[in-house]
Image: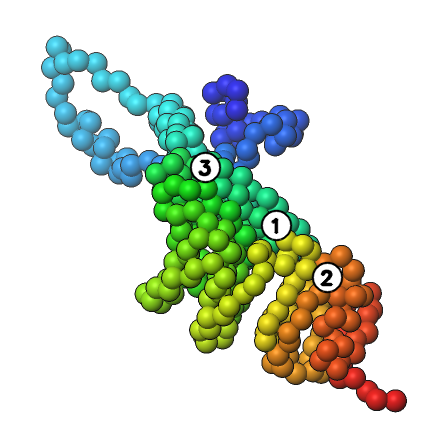
Amino acid sequence: MKQEKDILKWFNQELSKQEIADLSASENLETLHKIDHYASQLEAPKMDAQKALESFKNRKLSKNAPKVRTLNLTVFYRIAAVFAILLTSSYFLFFNNTQSFETTIAQMETVQLPDNSEVILNAASTLSYHKKSWKDNRSLELEGEAFFKVAKGKRFTVHTDAGIVQVLGTQFNVKERENYFEVTCYEGLVSVTHNKETVKLPKGKSFRILNNHIELQDITATNPSWLQQESSFTNIPLSQVIEELERQYNLQIDATKVDINQLFTGTFTHSNKEIALQSVTIPLKLSYSITSEKVTFKNYEVQ
C-alpha cells in the first residue's frame, strides 16, 4: 500500500468499499492477509484491574517523584502492526526467491534457466528452483515430465519424489508420474539415485521404474517423442497410456470394462484425438465410444 495510514485503516477495517476494491486491484491481497495474521498474534498482557487499583492507593509517592505516563495501547498495537508489515515485507523481498513454472492439460512450455540451460515441460507438470542460490547450487524440483538441455558447469540436480538425477552438462528426459519413473540419457552421462542406489546412464540408456520394478533399456531416439507432439510407449500398461491420453487431450476415459494391465507398445499423436484413440485401441483389439462427457473403452465385439 502507498501510505502507512492506509495500512492502518485496512487493519482497523475502516476502508470504504471503493478503497477495498482499489486495494484488491493494485496490491497483493494475499500478502496483506498474511500480515494481518501475524499482527493478530500480538496479545495484550493480562492484568487484574482491582489489584492494580489497590496497589496504586497503597503507594506513597514523594513530591519529587517523576510523573507517570500511561501507555496508549492503541498506539502500541498500531506500531506493532507496522513492525509486522516490515518483517513480512522483508521476507518476501529477501527470502521468497522461488521461481515456479506450471503447465496444464495439453500444454508445453519452454523455460530458460539463469545459466542458459533449457527445460521443456510436458503437459500437467511443475518446475521450481531458487533464483538467489542458483549460481552456486543448480538444483530444481520437478513433478511430471521435462526434457533438459543442461549448459556445462557445476553439478545440475533434478529432485523428484521417486529419485534424484544429477549431471554436469547433457541432454536427458525425466518422467515422474504415479507408479512410474523414467530417466533417459540422450547426451553425456546421467546419474540417477533411487532408494540410495545410484545408476550411471550413458547416452542411449534409459532407467525405468514401473510399479516398483526397475528396468534398464537401450534407446535409439535422439530426443523424447513428445517434443514432436507424439507419445511413445514400450511394454507399458494400458492404465499409463490412458493417463497420458487424458493429459494431452483433456479427456475423461472410462476403462472399467477392459483390462487396464495389458501392455501397450506404440505411439499416439497429440494433434488428432480420433487418430490417437484409434492408435491405442486397435492394436489392443479394443473399441471406444465418445459422448459429450467422456470416452468409454470396450472390448471389440465381432459382428
Say whether disc 2 or disc 3 marks the residue closer to the N-terminus.
3
Question: Of circles 3 and 1, which is in front?
Answer: 3
Q: Amino acid at mark 1?
A: Thr
Dot 3 or dot 1, earlier in sequence: 1
**Residue at the image point whose x is 12% and y is 21% from the top:** 60
Q: CA distance from mark 1 to mark 2?
A: 19 Å
Q: Is residue 227 above or below residue 130?
A: below
Front residue (pair 113, 10)? 113
Residue topped by disc 3: 115
State the SS at label 2.
strand
Could you tell which of marks 1 and 2 lies nearer the N-terminus? 1
Query: Residue shown at 42%/61% (left/top)?
Result: 201
Q: Nearer the viewer, residue 44 or 142?
A: 142
Cα–Cα span, label 2 and label 3:
33 Å
Identify the amino acid type marked 3.
Answer: Asp
Relative image position of residue 7 (x, y in whole percent): 49, 25
Disc 3 from disc 1: Cα separation: 22 Å
Which residue is identified by label 1?
103
Residue 194 placed where, x, y %? Answer: 38, 65
Q: Residues within 10 Å of mark 2 (few under 14, many from 20)?
A: many
| Closer to us: 43 or 135 | 135
Query: Viewed as shown, does residue 157 lie left or right of 287?
Result: left
Is residue 54 shown above or below 222? above
Q: State the image coordinates of residue 123 (x, y, percent, origin top left).
A: 63, 55
Residue in view at x 45 percent, y 37 percent: 115
Query: Which quarter of the figure is the C terminus placed in?
Result: bottom right
**Mark 1 surroundings: few (<14), some (14-19) or many (≥20) residues within 10 A:** some
Kind of residue at badge 2? Thr
Q: Looking at the image, do the residues carrying marks 3 and 1 touch, with CB atoms under 8 Å apart?
A: no
- The residue that appears at 57% across and 48% down in the rendered structure is 120
In the rendered image, which residue does mark 2 sit on?
269
